[in-house]
Image (tube, helix red, strand yellow):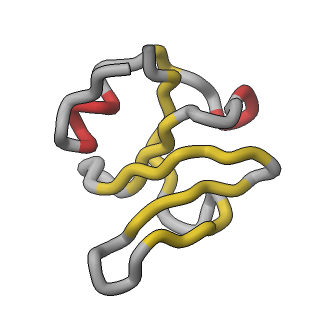
Amino acid sequence: VSLPHSSSAQYSSGTPVSSGDLQPGDLVFYYSPISHVGIYIGNGMIVHAANPGTGVAVSGLYSMPFAGAVRPG
């Protein structure tokens, strides 16, 4: 799957998915305007990297202000 670099462009490049229909691999977006993206891994959890200092983390889907989700591809 090819994706644009910025999180806001990624949000525009997939098929919108409601939070109730998320599947592992869906991209989830946060804040308004959109400035952060994670990958849904199932069971209400995402994997994301907030910044280089904190590295990759597993967090709850609603651990940040949820803006929407898309299914890439």
Q: In this orientation, which residue lies closer to the viewer: 50 or 18?
A: 50
Q: Seen from this angle, which residue lies furthest bottom? A: 53
Quarter of the picture containing the N terminus is top left
Work out which quarter of the rendered image holds the C terminus and state it: top left
Toward the viewer: 23 or 55?
A: 55
Residue 42 drawn above or below residue 70: below
Direction from residue 52 to residue 20 in the image, left or right: right
Query: Which picture quadrant has residue 21?
Result: top right
Q: Position of residue 24 (x, y in %)?
A: 67, 36
Residue at 50%, 66% (x, y): give it. 64
Residue at left offset 39%, top offset 50%? 37
Number of marks in picture = 0
Q: Position of residue 38 (x, y in %)?
A: 47, 51
Q: Is residue 68 above or below residue 62?
A: above
State the image coordinates of residue 68 (x, y, percent, origin top left): 48, 38
- Residue 7 drawn at (x, y percent): 27, 43
Say which quarter of the image contains residue 42: top right
Give the side of residue 13 with respect to residue 48, left or right. Answer: left
Question: Which residue occupies the extreme right position in the image?
Answer: 43
In the figure, 52 relative to 29: above or below? below
Left or right of 10? Residue 4 is: left
* Residue at 28% across, 27% down: 3
- Residue plotted at (61% across, 45% down): 40
